[in-house]
Image: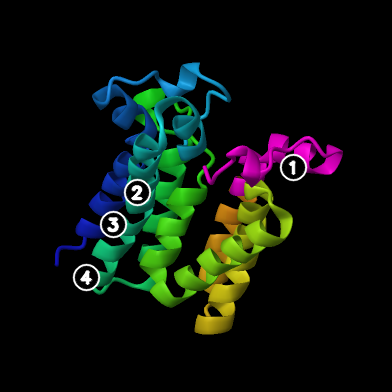
Amino acid sequence: MPDFVPSILVILAYLLGSASAAIITCKIMGKPDPRTQGSQNPGATNVMRYAGKKAAAITLLGDLLKGLIPVAIGHYLDLSWGWLILFGIVAFLGHLYPIFFGFKGGKGVATALGVYFGLNPLVGVLIGLTWLISSLVFNISSLSALIACLLAPLYFFWVTGSMDLFLGLSLITVLIYWRHRRNIMGIIDGTESKISAKKEIE
């Protein structure tokens, strides 16, 4: 494999991450642009509120695949962990700051979950179960996502022993917390929406 291929894949990972599943899905289905509705966040939650469960499910799947595909390709090409982590981070950054949509993207949880599954499916399941259990206990989707993403680097280090994975995924966690800063304030002051009030993962 030519030496320049991984570098090209980094660029492609960012471009794939920049393709907003929410905006594209809503446009194809003739639904309102999620950036003009509700929280104005192009994520599955906002799509479900205004475009329905089908559009939200497609958005969620699309956001997951954006994180999964670049890492899976890296696995297929037998690239190092360093490259795999970089592909995942760049795809995640594409979702947060998409070049196609004025660098205004979503909060990144679904795309991060795709990265987790791409790096290690078993750990991805563990993180997903953490979100599920937390959601059952606290009934707040954003809090459940924050807990799962906080534990994700620790899970990967526990299973793989890789400090590179721990540090790379810690960066994703920090960015997710930054994007959820309003949700965190809502959790603190008790105004954050409950799952029972149709709040889902974004």
Q: Secondary structure at mark 1?
A: helix
Mark 2 = which residue?
61
Q: Residue furthest left?
A: 1
Mark 4 = which residue?
76
Q: Secondary structure at mark 2?
A: helix
Q: Secondary structure at mark 4?
A: helix
Residue closer to the observer: 4 or 182: 182
How far is the residue under mark 3 from the one under mark 2?
12 Å
Q: Secondary structure at mark 3?
A: helix
Where residue 19 appears, as percent x and y from the top left, is: 32, 36
Residue closer to the observer: 119 or 77: 119
Amino acid marked by disc 1: Ile
Q: Is residue 80 magenta?
A: no
Amino acid marked by disc 3: Ile
Mark 1 = which residue?
184
Where residue 38 appears, as percent x and y from the top left, is: 56, 22
- Above or below for 91 versus 183: below
For the residue carrying disc 4, how many other residues have a C-alpha within 10 Å: few (<14), some (14-19), or many (20+)? few
Q: Residue furthest right?
A: 189
The residue stretch that appears in magenta: 176-202
